[in-house]
Image: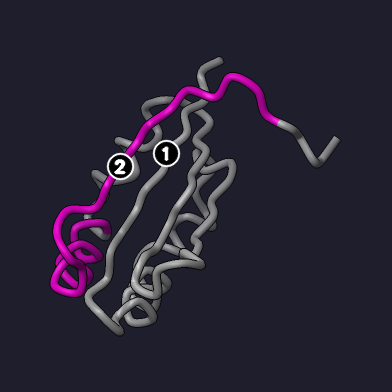
Amino acid sequence: MSKSALFIMHKAKPGQREQVRQIWQKHLQPQIAGNTGHQAYFYCYDDNDPDMICVFQLYAHRNDAQEFVQQPWYQAYLAEVTPLLVGESQFRSATPFWMKDSAA
């Protein structure tokens, strides 16, 4: 299987999670919506931490994630969002072994 999954955890500064989401919506959401490499994308708020953001992405091909973050608009997103985050975001890449296809 050539698909690739990515799990990301972002920790916003206290009370800044909504502002982080607004920056994500401004810079990334339109790009993700039109990106054929993203087969699934979930932007979630952690239910147990009011400052944590959890993201799950499913890419059609392993190199699609790297290609996505190399675009110039991604750097604009990072420049605006980084001051609102605590420390480094956590990234975990994974190879899907089995998936339920709800479209079938």
Question: Residue beneath label 2, please?
Answer: 91
Instruction: Locate residue 68, reporting x and y percent.
Output: 34, 44
| Coloring applied to the structure | one colour
Q: Name the amino acid, label 2.
A: Phe
Tags 2 and 1 in contact by the CB under 8 Å rule? Answer: yes
Could you tell me which residue is drawn at 54 percent across and 57 percent down? 33
Residues packed near mark 1 inside 10 Å, few (<14), some (14 to 19) or many (20 plus): some
Q: Nearer the viewer, residue 50 or 2?
A: 50
Quadrant position of residue 70? top left
Dot placed on the residue nearer the N-terminal end, 2 or 1: 1
Distance between the alpha carbons at the discs numbered 2 and 1: 7 Å
Q: Name the amino acid, label 1.
A: Leu
Instruction: Locate residue 43, reporting x and y percent.
Output: 49, 60
Could you tell me which secondary element the residue under label 1 belongs to?
strand
Q: Quadrant of the C terminus?
A: top right
Could you tell me which residue is drawn at 37 percent across and 68 percent down? 24
Residues packed near mark 2 inside 10 Å, few (<14), some (14 to 19) or many (20 plus): few
> Compared with residue 21, is residue 61 higher up or lower down, i.e. above or below?
above
Start-end of magenta stretch: 74-99
Q: Which mark is residue 6?
A: 1
Instruction: Locate residue 57, reporting x and y percent.
Output: 48, 44
Q: Is residue 75 magenta?
A: yes
Could you tell me which residue is drawn at 30 percent across and 84 percent down? 15
Could you tell me which residue is drawn at 41 percent across and 43 percent down? 7
Q: Is residue 90 magenta?
A: yes
Q: Which mark is residue 50?
A: none
